Structures are given as structure tokens and as C-alpha cells.
Amino acid sequence: MIKTFTAHTYFQIVSLLVLIQALFWLPSCSKPEIIPSYIHIDSIGLTTSPGVDGSNSHNISDAWVYVDNQLVGAFELPATIPIPYTGNHNLQVLGGIKKNGSTAEREAYPFYTQWTKAMNLVPESKFSVKPVVAYTSYSHPFVWMENFDSPGISLIDSIQSDTILIKDSLNPFEGHYSGSAYLDGKAGKVSGSTHTHFQCQTTQSFVHNSVSEVVYMEINYRCNTKFFVGLVNTSDYSATQFVFFNPTTTWKKMYVRLSDALVGVPIGYSYLIYLGMVKDPLLDVSEMHIDNIKLIH
């Protein structure tokens, strides 16, 4: 019996032929697979100019990696990074930090320079690089620096404080001194008070220039109880606590993004920076140690 083809059957046959042809041509029409090369970065260094930049201590935790100005990604260090390029290219690396010490808020630090290297990227090869950054030219001069090794101190005790900030030679971070405050619960400097509350503020004020201005305060610290940094708005002398520092037995560094706290300060008005600590009742002595403060915008 002769089998006739209906329109439906014809459509099925044509569709099958088209599908077979598409599957046949698919491998040759697809883009070739990109085999990456790999860049390994253990850490990023910081170089400083003596007498200009102060300490070269840093806490660069991440590498923001670009190739020919195209972002590859941000990577916590140490990292081995796949680079989807081959041949001659410019590798660019920016030093990344944790904003206000938060692991959830990271960014390329705007006051460090970009490290660049021309490279011939070979698929499946692994290159180790050692980026070194510096402070940008536009970050100079720093608005404020305090390393506690000069004769005076640019921080004074607030009237609310019942103890004082001292230049302390006991286990400084570097140099000869750090700034320290101790709260031992004993009789304070004011009659009837006790050493349970400490607060100090900058001797100078700083101008809030623009809503778009990025302002950072760098600080090395060690403490056995929480302390905080805040701002005093000189337009109405209101005080705002901003970032808290958690206890640490070793010296650490934090990048405090003060521009986030400046929203309440009118443009053209000034502000003071202050630090404070309250005695922990579970400790015989609460301690706060600070060093290498830099204010940059």
C-alpha cells in the first residue's frame, strides 16, 4: 500500500531535517572556548614618602583587578585569579579595603594609586605578581595626621571625660609612643567622679566642602573593650557616634569612611572628630590604644 504524506507529516519531516542540520553546524558556529591564564597575588604593598605620608601601615584586604581598564573582578587576598584574555594586555590592580571594618562593605580605596603592568598572557599559564601602591597626589597634603611622636598632641580631653589621653611608651604600635586611655574605676579628675568614661576630640575643626567629597580617617588601634569614633557638628554642636571598634589583643587598622557621617553637617560648616570609651564593669581596667591617625579627602 502506498503511504501518502499529509501536510502534518511533511512539516514533521522538514522540522526534523532542520534540527539535524542545526545540530550538525552547531559546533562550528559556536564561539571558541576562552582558556584563561591565571594571576596570583599574595598581597599588595604600600610605599610611603617619609615626612609626607606618615606610616606605611595598611590593611589592604582585596585586589580589584582590571585588564585594559575592563573590570575582571574584586578578590580577597591571597587569590589566584582567572584572566579571560590572551596575548599582550595591561594588567591593572587597585588596593581594596573593608569600609568601616565591615566584611560586607568593600571598595577600592580611592586614595591609593593604581598598579599597572604590561603582560603577555598565555592560556593555562600562572603568573605571580606583587603589586605595590602609594598615596595619590590629589590626597596630599593630608588634612590631619597624628602619630603621637611629636612634642604635642592634636587631641584634647572633652569636658565630659573623667580621665585623660596620654602619650604612652608601653607597647606602641610603632615609633616611640601611641595615644592611650585607661579607665580603672578609681577616683577621677573631678571631685566625686570616677574613671569610668573617656572622651577626647580634635584641637582643630575640619570643613565639610561638598556632598560628593569622599572623606576617610585611617587609624591603628588596640583595645580590650569597645570604643567609638564620632563627629561634632559645629553648626549646632550636636554629637553623633559613628563607628565602633571591637576588642582586639593585636594592633589592627581600620579605614573609617567619615563622609557617610557628614550628611548632617551643612556644606561650608566644620566638624570635630571625637573618640570615646566607657569602662567595662567586667574588666579591672578598660584600655584604648591608638596610633597613626590620618584624615584624607
Image (tube, rainbow, N blue to C red):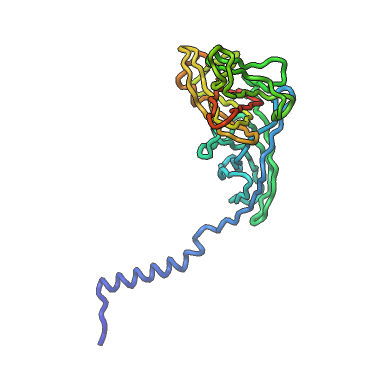
Image quadrant in which you'd find residue 72 = top right
Residue 138 in view in this figure: no
Figure disc tally: 0
Image quadrant containing the C terminus:
top right
Of the pair 224 and 296, the residue shown nearer to us = 224
Of the pair 174 and 100, the residue shown nearer to us = 174
Residue 93 in view in this figure: yes
In the image, taking residue 236 as reference, residue 151 lies left or right, namely: right
Where residue 289 sits in the image (x, y, percent)?
63, 27
In the image, taking residue 27 as reference, residue 297 lies left or right, namely: right
56 is higher (above) or lower (below) than 16: above
User: Which residue is the extreme one toward the bottom?
Assistant: 1
Of the pair 276 and 136, the residue shown nearer to us = 276
Where residue 82 sits in the image (x, y, percent)?
60, 51
51 is higher (above) or lower (below) than 118: above
171 is higher (above) or lower (below) than 92: above
Where residue 36 sits in the image (x, y, percent)?
60, 54
Image quadrant containing the N terminus:
bottom left
Where residue 172 sits in the image (x, y, percent)?
70, 28
Of the pair 18 and 243, the residue shown nearer to us = 243
In the image, taking residue 17 as reference, residue 249 lies left or right, namely: right
Q: Residue at x 61, y 43 (%)?
A: 67
Q: Residue at x 67, y 45 (%)?
A: 42
